[in-house]
Amino acid sequence: MARSSRKNRLEDIARHAGVGVATVDRVLNERGGVSEKTTARVLASAQSLGTKRVLPSNRERRLSIEAVLFRNHSAFYSRLNQALKEVTKLADIPATIYRTHIDVDDPERLISHLEAVAESRDGIILFASDLPQISDAIKRLAKQTTIVTISTDIPDSARHCYIGIDNFNAGQSAAKISEAICRKGGRILIIEPDPTAWAQMERFKGFQQFFANRGEEEKLRRFYQTKPLTLALGEVIALLQAEEDIRVLYSPINNEFLEMLVEAGRHETTIRSVAKIVHDLSPHSIKNLQSGLIDIVLDSNPMQQVFQAVEFISEQHGYVTKLESSVVDFQLYTSDNLPRTQFI
C-alpha cells in the first residue's frame, strides 16, 4: 500500500511537471543526470502539490560528471588524468567525476559508453579524436547532457564547448621562434602529426601558415613517421646528415617517437646540434630541458583545462563560477623557468 501510494505521488508530480516518473525519482533522490531547468520544474511541481517530504535544494545538488578519455601513452594524458583526480579538491563546486579510459583504436566502444552514460550524467568531459562517427554520436547525445571537448576539439559535433589552448596560435609561436633562429639561413624539420589528432594538426597548421604568410615555405622540411620507431629514427638521422642546413626540429607531437629522437641526441651529433622545440611538459621533457637536449617547451596546462571544463558544466546547471573564458593560456618553458610543482 505504501509503495503504491509513493508511486502515485511520483506520477502526480510527473504529470504536473510534464516529465517521466524516472525523472521525478532522480530529482527527488538527488541522483543527478537531470538538467537544471527540468530539476527546477520538478521541484516546483512537488512543492505546488504539497509533497510531504523534505525537498532537495537545487543549488546544493552534487553534480555527476563523466570524463571519457582516449587512452594513450603520452605524459600529457597522464597529467590530464591526474588533474581529473585532483580538480574537485580545488574547485569550490560539489561534483563527482567518474573517469573512463578507452583505447584510442576502439572508437565504437567509446561511442557505446557515451550512449550508456549520457542520460545519467550532468555533463561529459571528452578527450578523443576528431572522427566522423564520434562527431555524429556527440550531435545526438548533446541533446541529453552537456558535452565539453578538452585539449583536442571535435569542432563539427555540436558539443557545447571546447576547453583548451589555442593550438593554432601555439604553432604560430613555435614558428616565430624557429624563424628567428633561422633568420640568417637554415631550415626547419617538422614532425608531421596524424591527421585525426585535431590539436596536433592545429599546431602544425599554425606553424606552416606563419611561413606561408611570409612566402618562406621552402624553409620547411616535413617528416611523417610511417615505419617502426627505430627505423624511423634512422631515417631522421640520415635526413639530417644529408641536409646540413636544418637548424631547428619542431614537433607538435609529444610521443614515444619524439622521446626516442631527443634521447638519440646524447650520442648523435646531427640531432644534438639542432634546436628542438616541442609541446607539453613531462618528466622526460623536463629532464631534457635541464640537460640541454630540448630547448623550448610550449605547455598546454591540463589542470587549468580540467578546472575550466568543470566550471563550464557547473554553470550550465546554475552554479556560480568565476569562468570568464574557455581559452586556456599556453605557457613557454626553458630550463630557467621550470615550475616548482611536480608534473606526472
Image (tube, rainbow, N blue to C red):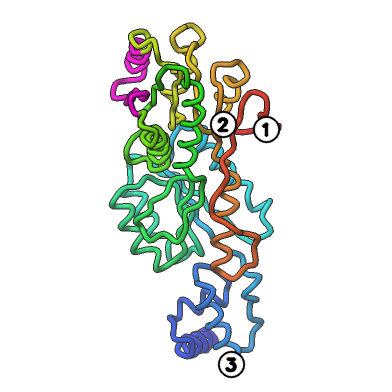
Q: Could you tell me how far apart the alpha carbons at marks 1 and 3 are, in whole angstroms?
A: 55 Å
Residue 252 lies in the magenta-colored region: no
**Kind of residue indicated by mark 1:** Pro
The tally of labels here is: 3
| Residue bearing mark 3 | 48
Closer-to-camera residue (180/328): 180
Residue 339: mark in rendering? 1
Q: Nearer the viewer, residue 43 or 241?
A: 241
Does label 1 or label 3 sit earlier along the sequence? 3
Gap in angstroms between the C-alphas marked 2 and 1: 10 Å
Q: Considering the image in quadrants, where does the C terminus appear?
A: top right
Crowd tier of the residue under label 2, counting other residues whose Cα lies within 10 Å: few below 14, some 14–19, many 20 or above: many
Residue 44 picture location, percent across and down:
57, 86
Q: Verify CB contact (< 8 Å) between mark 2 and mark 1.
A: yes
N-terminal-most mark, 2 or 1: 2
Q: CA distance from mark 2 to mark 3?
A: 55 Å
Point 64% across, 84% down: residue: 53
